[in-house]
Image (spheres, rainbow, N blue to C red):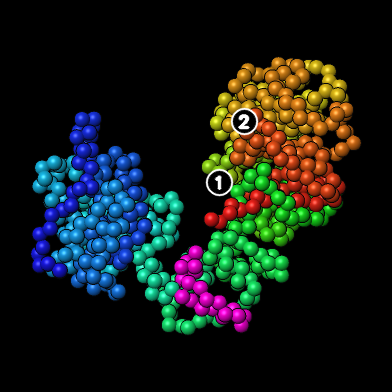
Amino acid sequence: MEANAEIPLPVDKLSIDLIQKTKSSISDPRYAVLVSSGSFNPPTYMHLRMFELARDELTAQGYTVLGGYLSPVNDEYKKKDLISGMHRIRMCELACKSSSFVTVDPWEAKQSSYQRNLEVLARIQSSLLKSGIFDKGSLKVMLLCGSDLLERWGVLKVWIADELRTICKDFGVVCIRREGMDIDKIICNNEILSENKNNIISVDEIVPNQISSTRVRSMASRDRVRFNVGGQLFETTSTTLANAGRESMLGALLDESWNPGQPEYFLDRNPACFSVLLDLLRTGALHIPANVPQKLLYREALYYGLLDHVRNAKWGPLDGNRLQLADSVPGRAPGDGTAIRAAPDGGCCVAHGSVVHVYNWMLEERKPISLDYQQVNDVGYIDADSIVITARERLGRAEGGMAIFSASTGELQHRFRVEHGQQPKSFTAGALSLAGPDDNRIFSSCKGRLNEYGIGMWDLNTGQQGDFFYELPGCSLGDADILQWLPSKNCLMVATLFPRTDNCFIGLLDFRAKTIPWSWSDAGIVVTLEDKRVLHAIAMEDGHSICVINQYEDLGFIDLRAGTGTNSAGAGVRWSSRSKLMNRKVPFEESCYPKLATHNGQLFSCMNDSISVFSGSEHVLTSTLSRSYGGSICDFSIGGDRLFALHNEDNVFDVWESSPSPII
């Protein structure tokens, strides 16, 4: 290292041209230069990624980010396994070749003694101000770091309080939050950080990445690992084990506490399953031999902490044109299936009379939810761990309504109440709808004893009733078959359809104004059994139209941008004939009516014993899903990248999956 080396600050990657552009367009421009000082032993992708994240956040806050510097620490830092500063400078230079605005400042590493962060920041600021391009008020040289460094400021004794105070107050800090760390709590627990919290900018890593120099060095020094699993030897690399993730048992072997001197590790587990899981970590693909039962593999994957890896590799993103029958699960009570609902994680639940049977994504049945002979009307998932159920009121008993249950234990977690005039009322809850992942509202159709008919709305955070939309003349809200929240319209679609009522009604409810700004109905006309009757409806994903289906499996589309529908059969409905029945007879002997669903631009409809898949803007029939037994499909549901179809006669449900994308 050079004694008191005078090394010019590299400025070739600074965006000096932005200064003139901002001066002409912004009256009070603010410029930022980012500096990250560290070992870089070696530099990793995440070191450069930190600069990208910080630049995006500062730009959003009105700064013009001119560039960034990697400043390798001096050799006198004396960190264990620290290689020569010259080598680290060269590695950083090679790493920065891929960046348009990050470069290396070798000054710190080339000094004859250890340099503190404040000295590094002050030197870069001084060099930039001497150029005459900036004035001190418009330029901010900011320390870029991870939240682990911020945490160490409050723990280690090597940090000088005045130095930290000056860095925070006069320069500023941009901190990238590492997974599992609470930056607000770190700041709150540190007096200096708390005093200067307005000068500390925290940035979340949207896609967490656990790459670190320590882990890279650890893997490079002990890359080969041997296991004795049930008497069978396996040899792999620490790189492969890293694919398991730090929270898994195998990934934990990469922690600093692991003893690399141990020649092999003995695991008294199933070697055949270990072979499958190890191959999954190597290739990303899951191949289960015929001699390995899936349930056994799932149990072993749970032990190693690899269950999520198995689930993600078992099936790919759902595509209606690539679906294959993966499994069929026999029901518990033939002939009375009410509904099937897919869980976000690939499991499902099936409502049979007064019981809801719950299955995890491995299709293992959990403890059923029993409502003590109350008829289940509808069911849905709030999340993978919570199920909401609507039920019919039992005469003479203040029961029924809607409640949340645990998906794993079946225990009641919360019962929703309906109040009228600040008095709780017993009610029958019917169709339900969740507003969405970022909206905590839940809706249900309600029928009370004293004509308290309408649609209730509750807050999932508080569990309390938030609003109630009373039934208006001409629209049967309490008997609604379908509820669906439309975010683009900020309205709730309500559909009451044949055969529940003689006439079909579809409307949009505006809870804020207590109005129905759009509706369609076939009321006021006489229809015969041969006429097309709307039996199911769903709002399309673009929010511009509603798709309906009749007894012939003809699809119809109603434009929501048009005016309210008139009282004529099919008024405003653009029918597209897809009938498979040449005589066009209504199959009233069938107990199952058609259903609709949408997913990623595709439209799905079930009729009799098959499901049709329509693709493209013209909704062309592209695939048909069917099987040879089970009878008609009474309900189907899509979620967790799976399609579940519930058959009526044998009460069996099918599981359809798309194969995972090929590993190249």
Image coordinates for residue 637, horizontal then vertical, percent: 70, 44
**Residue lying at 13% horizontally and 51% vertically, measured from the top left:** 127
Question: Is 225 in the magenta?
Answer: yes
Residue type, numbered disc 2:
Ser
Q: Secondary structure at mark 1?
A: loop
Position of residue 482 measured from the top left corner of the image (x, y, whole percent): 70, 35
User: Does 283 appear in magenta?
Assistant: no
Question: Which residue sits furthest front?
Answer: 664
Residue type marked 1: Asn
The residue segment tinted magenta is: 224-243
On the image, the x and y values in percent for residue 155 come to 30, 67
Whether residue 190 can be seen here:
no
Toward the viewer: 213 or 616? 616
Taking 229 as reference, is 377 above or below it?
above
Location of mark 1 (residue): 461
Specify the principal SS of the magenta part.
strand
**In which quadrant of the rendered image does the N terminus lie?**
bottom left
Q: Which residue is mark 2?
A: 617
